């Protein structure tokens, strides 16, 4: 088995083309490079370098060894990065982008617990319906309701968020489906999957009001304004609401976690990811 230090000196010679150049790159003397190179050739019992008057040239077998040594160097660098990351303190700011319904009703209520566990991490929670770019550092971690396609990032499906129809417990037409009136989004959200689902159920029945965020739908349903399509985790947790419409078509949104590959192993980012994963996988109302 070749000594890694000998291989490292061989790589320096191959890159610089001279023993003196390798010595300068490694900050050692000329004799050390020559000794390490000779030791490697003795270990492998092959000639790796042709020593010319003013330069060094790889032999045919030397070129093959060079390619393998490059791969070894890359792996060694990866080990070093992992080790450095393990010793990076859990401090700094981490920006987490999430759909408004998850930001307000799932993540925000648990921020105090996160803070008590990681007092030196400042978690910046951005409630955003639009998709942000991780490559442009608009966020460090993101939750999305559609499968991410951003290159250079790591994506993981965490679970499924089912929806249902909800109305106030004393909603006047609760037991008369033909007289239900619905709480929907406006026309600018016509392509949103839950809007299509809700309007498909409503059919010819009237829309009572339009609000452009899910929290508004929730509040309007609690006020008795009509029937809203809400995530089960939100509607089921509200004692003022009751789920209705047992025979309606089922509907759900996938929940995806996205992080840039370069940040995936950073301890502070990892802590935020673990926090999000625990909430999604352990919180009632979600399925994997």
Image (cartoon, rainbow, N blue to C red):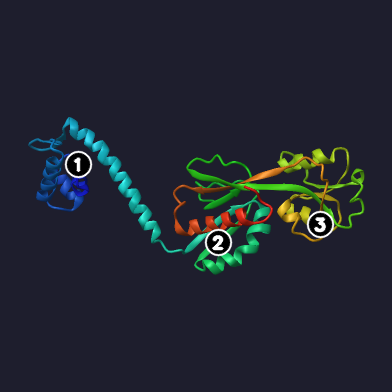
For the residues labelled 3 and 2, the Cα–Cα distance comes to 32 Å
Disc nearest the viewer among 3 and 2: 3
Crowd band around label 1 with a 10 angstrom C-alpha radius: few (<14), some (14–19), many (20+): some
The tag earlier along the polypeptide, 2 or 1, is 1
Looking at the picture, tell me which residue is in the foreground, 136 or 66.
66
Q: Which mark is residue 16?
A: 1
| Residue to which mark 2 is pinned | 123
| Image location of residue 138, percent across then percent down | 54, 51
The tag earlier along the polypeptide, 3 or 2, is 2
Q: In this view, does 118 lie above or below 196?
A: below
Q: What element carries label 2?
A: strand
* Residue for point 21% across, 42% down: 11
Crowd band around label 2 with a 10 angstrom C-alpha radius: few (<14), some (14–19), many (20+): some
Residue 205 lies in quadrant: top right
User: Answer yes or no: do the residues labelled 2 and 1 have beta carbons within 8 Å?
Assistant: no
Residue 27 in sight here:
yes
| Image location of residue 21, percent across then percent down | 16, 45
Residue 139 in sight here:
no
Disc nearest the viewer among 1 and 3: 3
| Residue to which mark 3 is pinned | 241
* Residue for point 11% across, 46% down: 34
């Amino acid at each position: 088995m070749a000594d890694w230090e000998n291989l490292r000196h061989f790589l320096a010679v191959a890159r610089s083309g001279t023993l003196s150049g390798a010595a300068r790159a490694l900050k050692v003397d000329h004799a050390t490079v020559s000794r390490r190179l000779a030791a490697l050739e003795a270990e492998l019992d092959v000639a790796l370098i042709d020593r010319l008057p003013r330069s060094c040239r790889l032999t045919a077998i030397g070129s093959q060894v060079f390619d393998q040594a490059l791969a070894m160097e890359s792996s060694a660098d990866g080990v070093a990065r992992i080790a450095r990351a393990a010793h990076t303190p859990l401090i700094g700011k981490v920006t987490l982008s999430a759909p408004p319904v998850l930001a307000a009703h799932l993540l925000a209520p648990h921020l105090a617990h996160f803070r008590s566990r990681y007092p030196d991490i400042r978690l910046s929670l951005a409630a955003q319906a639009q998709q942000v770019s991780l490559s442009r550092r608009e966020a460090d971690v993101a939750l999305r309701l559609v499968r991410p396609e951003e290159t250079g990032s790591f994506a993981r499906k965490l679970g499924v968020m089912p929806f249902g129809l909800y109305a106030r417990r004393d909603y006047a037409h609760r037991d008369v489906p033909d007289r239900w009136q619905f709480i929907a989004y406006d026309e600018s959200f016509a392509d949103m999957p839950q809007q299509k689902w809700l309007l498909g159920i409503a059919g010819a029945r009237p829309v009572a009001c339009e609000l452009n965020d899910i929290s508004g739908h929730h509040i309007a349903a609690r006020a008795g304004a009509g029937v809203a399509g809400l995530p089960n985790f939100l509607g089921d947790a509200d004692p003022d609401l009751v789920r209705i419409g047992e025979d309606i078509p089922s509907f759900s949104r996938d929940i995806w976690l996205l992080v840039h590959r370069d940040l995936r192993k950073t301890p502070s980012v990892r802590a935020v990811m673990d926090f999000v994963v625990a909430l999604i996988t352990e919180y009632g109302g979600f399925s994997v």
